[in-house]
Amino acid sequence: MGAIEVTRYTIGKYKNYKHAWDEIYDEDRYENGHDYYSGGISNCMSPELIAVHPKYGSKKFNEWVEDKLSIAHKQDCFCVEITGAALKRVKGNFWKGRRGIKAFYFFGIAPY
């Protein structure tokens, strides 16, 4: 069997990245089924939070993600918390003015 790159972005009132991961995991299992080789992000291991990274949404960030995925092994998963001006941009009008909102970007290699 092979592997596929998977990415998922989420925004909401999360306590931490593990809380966001639980929601993403359950949603993916519902959408793609419980098969180990479904190719969904739920087939990845629990994500590693990366604190130092380029600014989310920049060209440098996209290149960094590609480099990180190129050396990752099957089932590796990573998480980046989106903060600052990037968070303000992704919040949009729906989340505007609300406190306690966090956004996370998950990416990894899933068995397929």
Image: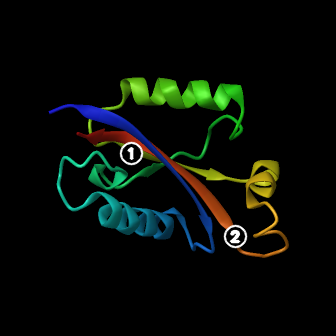
Labels 1 and 2 touching (C-beta < 8 A): no
Would residue 65 be found to the left or right of residue 101 on screen?
Answer: left
Which residue is most to the front?
31
92 versus 13 height, above or below:
above
* Quadrant containing the N terminus in the rendered view: top left
* Quadrant containing the C terminus in the rendered view: top left
Rendering quarter of residue 23? bottom left
Residue 86 position within the rendered picture, expressed as x and y whole percent measured from the top left: 76, 48
Would residue 96 be found to the left or right of residue 21 on screen?
Answer: right
Characterize the local packing of mark 1: few (<14), some (14-19) or many (20 or more) Cα atoms within 10 angstroms.
Answer: many
33 versus 63 height, above or below:
below
Amino acid type of the residue tagged 1 in the rendering: Cys
Would residue 27 be found to the left or right of residue 62 on screen?
Answer: left
Q: Label 2's element?
A: loop
Residue 47 position within the rendered picture, expressed as x and y whole percent measured from the top left: 40, 52
Residue 58 position within the rendered picture, expressed as x and y whole percent measured from the top left: 72, 32
Looking at the image, which residue is at 46% across and 29% down? Answer: 68
Looking at the image, which residue is at 59% across and 24% down? Answer: 63
Residue tagged 2: 101
Q: Label 1's element?
A: strand
Looking at the image, which residue is at 36% across and 50% down? Answer: 41
For the residues labelled 1 and 2, the Cα–Cα distance comes to 22 Å
Looking at the image, which residue is at 42% across and 30% down? Answer: 69
Relative to the observer, which residue lies in front, 58 or 35?
35
Label 1 or label 2, whichever comes before in sequence order: 1
Numbered label tally: 2
> Any mark on residue 77, and which?
1
**What kind of colouring is applied to the model shown?**
rainbow
Residue 111 position within the rendered picture, expressed as x and y whole percent measured from the top left: 23, 40
Amino acid type of the residue tagged 2 in the rendering: Ile
Characterize the local packing of mark 2: few (<14), some (14-19) or many (20 or more) Cα atoms within 10 angstroms.
Answer: some
